[in-house]
Structure formats: C-alpha cells, structure tokens
Image (cartoon, rainbow, N blue to C red):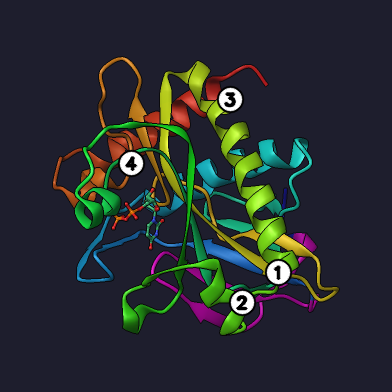
Amino acid sequence: MSGEKFTRREMMYEGKAKRLYATDDPEVVLVEYKDSFTAFNGEKRAEMSGKGRLNNLISSEIFEYLARNSVPLHFIERVDELRQLAVRVKIVPLEVVVRNITTGSIVKRLGVEEGMKLDRPLLEFYYKDDALGDPIVTEDHALLFGWAHEEDLLRIKEITLRVNDLLKKLFAPLGIVLVDFKLEFGHDSKGSLLLADEISPDTCRFWDSSTGDRLDKDRFRKDLGDVLGAYEEIYKRLSARDK
Ligand code: UDP
C-alpha cells in the first residue's frame, strides 16, 4: 500500500491517542495513531515510542478480521505503520462497553467481586463527555437527550454482541481471554451506522489464559511495567495466527 491513493490535508481533530486528517475525498479520513498513553480521564499521561505503531497494527488486524465477518466498519485499510484510512463518520456520543468478566470500574462502582465470569455479556453505555468524566447512562438517557435513536441503539447492541462473539473466537485460540472492551459507532454521510474508532489493548482488557498476565492498558494504569511488551505480545499472537 502506498501513499499515492490519498493526499493528506488539514488536521480535523486531535484526540488522546489519534489524529484525524482530511483527505481529498470528503468521505475519507486519515487516522494517525500517536505514541501517547492517557488514563483516569487524562490525569495520568506518558509517551511511549512504538505504541502508536502497535495499536495501528493490532487495530488493523482486528478490523480486517471483522470486515471478513461482515461487520460494518469505518475502517478502509491500513496505509503504513502508523496510519489507516477510514470512512468519515459523525460519532454517536456513546461509549459502548461489554464485560465478560468483572474488573475495573464495575468492581469499584458496585462492589462486586473481581474476576467473576458473567453468565452472559453485560452491556453498558457511557456518555462521551470528558468534562463530565464519561458518566454511565441508560438507553433512556440516550433516547431522551437525543444522543441516539431507537433503531441506532438496537443496531449498536446487535453489532456489539456480534463483535464480542467474534473477538472471543479470535482470541481464545491465541491463549487470550477477552475480559471487556469499549466500542464507538458513527454514521456515514448516507446515515449508515458503522463501527468506528479503534480496537486495541487501549480499549480492551486481555488476560493471558494460562498465566493471567495482563496484556493491555492496565499495565500502564496500574504501573505493572513492560507495557509495550504486552502490546507486542498481542500483535505477535495475532499476526502469527492461521488466517
Ligand atoms: N475503556 C476505554 N475507554 C474509556 C473507558 C473504558 O477504552 O474511556 C475500556 C477499558 O479499556 C476496558 C473497558 O472499556 O477494556 C471497561 O473499562 P472500565 O469501565 O472498567 O473503566 P476503567 O477501569 O478503564 O476506568
């Protein structure tokens, strides 16, 4: 893949982990992954050289797998080590979290036991608003405050549960347990709902199934050390698998 297919235009947006650039095609954006880590609503920060590359590679592998399984995606293709082309979308201001095992904020918030295997996936919505610290909300909040329509929520839930099944199937043979993850969605110019953002060790919790080692951003959140080694391990197992 070469850079001939697009011209990078102005930067449209800079987030905590990625920059978005316009291209000559109004329907297409260039997503550039950054080397920065943030946690606890931006209170903890660090730069780690090589992190952007790993998340771009991992996210691209996962999106390519989901595309082969007919999940509607904003992802078009990986361009190089740091960048992807994606369909321009208007983001639905909801973070959709799926939990298969209890850990993280649900343990803190509800006092439930850590590491409980849930009988079925637990789906939660958070309102995307940094100033408010992304509060947890119900579907009714999303509907009544106009963040999403009923049919969007139905589609979002359907796609999210399918992605959970597909990701569990992808990672189990690699010796990785998919503990929980976060998805974001957007609408393209025709109004179609697409899975957007990224899927990486920044947005998922991955536990090694034999050792229980954390192979995700919890290594950064909890100062467990060798953060990039864990991301490298995820990429190594993903890229070495039979496709
Ligand atoms: N998550 C995310 N972005 C966020 C919040 C959560 O990607 O802004 C992911 C997180 O990596 C984990 C899952 O969503 O895989 C559930 O996170 P949790 O609610 O436990 O929050 P945390 O412990 O990260 O504050």
Label 3 close to label 2 by CB (< 8 Å)? no
**Separation of residues labelled 1 and 3 (CA atoms):** 29 Å
Q: Which of marks 3 and 2 is in front?
A: 2
What's the residue type where badge 2 is placed?
Answer: Leu
SS type, badge 3: helix
* CB contact under 8 Å: marks 1 and 3: no
Q: Residues within 10 Å of mark 4 (few under 14, many from 20)?
A: many
Q: Does the residue labelled 2 lie within 8 Å of ligand 1?
A: no
Q: Residue 121, how many percent across, how many down?
A: 49, 39
Judging by the rendered image, the residue that carries numbered circle 2 is: 143
Label 1 neighbourhood size at 10 Å, few (<14), some (14-19), many (20+)? few
Image quarter for ligand 1: bottom left
Left or right of residue 38, residue 143 in this image: right
Q: Which mark sits nearer the N-terminus, 2 or 4?
A: 2
Residue situated in front as seen by the camera: 241 or 106: 106
Residue 216: name its quadrant.
top left
CB of mark 2 within 8 Å of CB of mark 1? Answer: yes
Quick check: is the Cβ at mark 4 less than 8 Å away from ligand 1?
Answer: yes
Residue carrying label 3: 169
Residue at position x 25%, y 45% in the image: 218
Q: Which of marks 1 and 4 is in front?
A: 1
* Vertical comparison of 30 with 61: above or below: below
Rounded to the nearest whole Å, what is the CA distance between mark 4 and mark 3?
18 Å
Nearer mark to the viewer, of 1 and 3: 1
User: Local crowd at mark 2 within 10 Å, few (<14), some, or many (≥20)?
Assistant: some
Can residue 141 be found in the magenta stretch? no
* Amino acid on which disc 3 is placed: Lys
Residue 216, numbered circle: 4
Quadrant of the image containing the C terminus: top right
